[in-house]
Amino acid sequence: MHDVIFPPSAPGLARPAGSWGLLPGRALSLQPRSRGRLTLVQGRAWLTVSAAGQASTDMVLHAGEGVVLPVRSHAVLEAWPQPGGAPVLAWQWAALPAAAVAPLDWRQAVAAPARDLGLAGRAWLQAAGRLARGLLGLAAWALVRPWAAWRADRGAARSAAWGLRSG
């Protein structure tokens, strides 16, 4: 059985120097003690980040992309299998000075709320459409109802004139 995490000095693994590795299909739980930037150097990964008082955020990272992780956050990094047996996932961690770090990565601060607003707007539009169809149906019935009652009364009068009985 192979190790899950490969340190920077592990021999025989094709990944950039100074990076840590993770086998495809494996996951790693990270709990930073200081604010820092997790950067994918090679491969593709699914990352779930949760921080105190905030909803967890899922994202897919590709080589060259990174995310800032706040102190006391929890991140789960999962290596995705690569087509054609590409090399293992490799990442780097760089601690950041407190002044250099925004409260959250833009994906958490902007993209996630924007996605939520988009979903809410879509639900609002669907509900407004159903309401409009219901109101139009009600208005149509209000216009047609007197005519339908007149037709029903006329049909009953015609049947009585010919001596026909129903039932």
Image (cartoon, grey):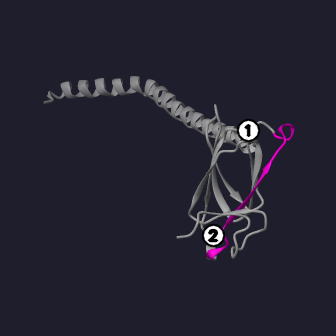
Q: Residue at x 66, y 40 (%)?
A: 73
Marks 1 and 2 close (CB-CB < 8 Å): no
Which of 140 and 56 lies nearest the eye of the viewer? 56
Residue density around tag 1, few if under 14, some if 14–19, many if 20 or more, within 10 Å? few
- The foreground one among 162 and 45 is 45
Give coordinates of residue 14: x percent, y percent.
Answer: 71, 74
Give the labeled residue for mark 1: 109
Residue 163: quarter of image? top left
The picture places residue 134, in percent across and down from the top left corner, at: 48, 30
Q: Is residue 125 magenta?
A: no
Q: Residue at x 61, y 35 (%)?
A: 120
Q: Relative to 91, is 138 above or below?
A: above
Tell me how far mark 1 sits from mark 2, CA to CA. Answer: 29 Å
Residue at image point 83% right, 38% down? 98
What residue does disc 2 label? 82
Q: How many numbered marks are there?
A: 2
Q: Is residue 54 above or below residue 6?
A: above
| 25 left or right of 141 in image | right
- Residue 47 image point, x, y percent: 64, 52
For residue 106, side relative to residue 59 (left or right):
right
Which of 30 and 130 lies nearest the eye of the viewer? 30
> Can you give x and y, in whole percent of width and height, for residue 69 in the image?
72, 44
Amino acid type at circle 1 is Ala
Residue at image coords 56%, 63%:
25
Decide which of tag 1 and tag 2 comes sooner along the chain.
2
Q: Secondary structure at mark 1?
A: helix
Callout 2: 10 Å neighbours few (<14), some, many (20+)? Answer: some
> In the rendered structure, which segment of residues is drawn in magenta?
85-101
